Amino acid sequence: GVGGAERPGAGAGAGSAGSGAPDGPDPTAPALPAALVAELEEADARLAHAPASAAVEWAVGRFGDRLALAASFQDIVLVDLLANVDPTIEVVFCDTGAHFPETLTFVDQVRERYDLRLTVTRPGDDASAWPCGTERCCQLRKVEPLRQVLASKSAWMTSLKRADAPTRAHTAIVGWDRVFGLVKVAVPILIIFAALLLWKQLTHFGWGYISHIKANHSVSWQYAIEANIAY
């Protein structure tokens, strides 16, 4: 995902190495205050095995309107959780210019259903020289547009799908994002409804409900969707 995050005690601050985005962090950035490091470490440890709703509630309670959620809308469960805690928090969707029309329709349907405070970013003119699959594609279509939105924020939240890569197994729930210079809250979810979500995008049946199941040994949180089919 855009903007790599690390546990705050693991070298955050001046002179840190890059963390995923091509342009990297500012090497002249000052070290994090010790009080902030301690706060983030405590929150990360406390939320590591807590329900996903606890991470969302902590982020909203701590940062309020200085928090934004960056959503792909594959992580619709996180949008649902946030809307239940505070529907006024800004939600950001990065329109890369390469999405299927059905995906954009789905985003608009979710925006209307939850009355989201939705910001849709789009690539700048310079992105046309770097089509999808080229070296600077993600930087220009995702990272930089998102950076502009997050410039006025103190923290951002996103979903973490641990099954996507073994390297994500120990990713911090709460950490410091050195690329954006913000607190990052990564909420682990297991998307066991991908096929259903695609079906939702391609047809017109309504959401039934989204329910939190229980933590298990391999994944911090697990979710299920039951569809209420209405042709």
Image (tube, grey):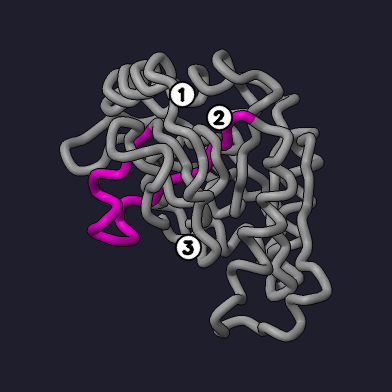
The answer to if 183 sits in the magenta stretch is no
Q: Is residue 169 above or below residue 86?
A: below
| In front: label 3 or label 2 | 2
User: Which residue appears farthest toward the front when viewing the image?
Assistant: 28
Tell me residue 48's x, y (percent). Answer: 29, 28
Between residue 50 and residue 166, name the one nearer to us. Answer: 166
Q: Quadrant of residue 18?
A: bottom left
Tell me residue 169's x, y (percent). Answer: 24, 49
- Residue 44 falls left or right of residue 74: left
Tag 1: Cα neighbours inside 10 Å, few (<14), some, or many (≥20)?
some
Between residue 75 and residue 60, name the one nearer to us. Answer: 60
Query: Which residue lies under the disc numbered 2?
Result: 81
The answer to if 156 sits in the magenta stretch is yes
Sequence order check, earlier mark of 1 and 3: 1
Tag 3: Cα neighbours inside 10 Å, few (<14), some, or many (≥20)?
few
Q: Amino acid at mark 3?
A: Ala
Q: Label 3, secondary structure: give it.
A: helix
Query: Which residue lies under the disc numbered 1?
Result: 53
| In front: label 1 or label 3 | 1
Tell me residue 54's x, y (percent). Answer: 43, 20
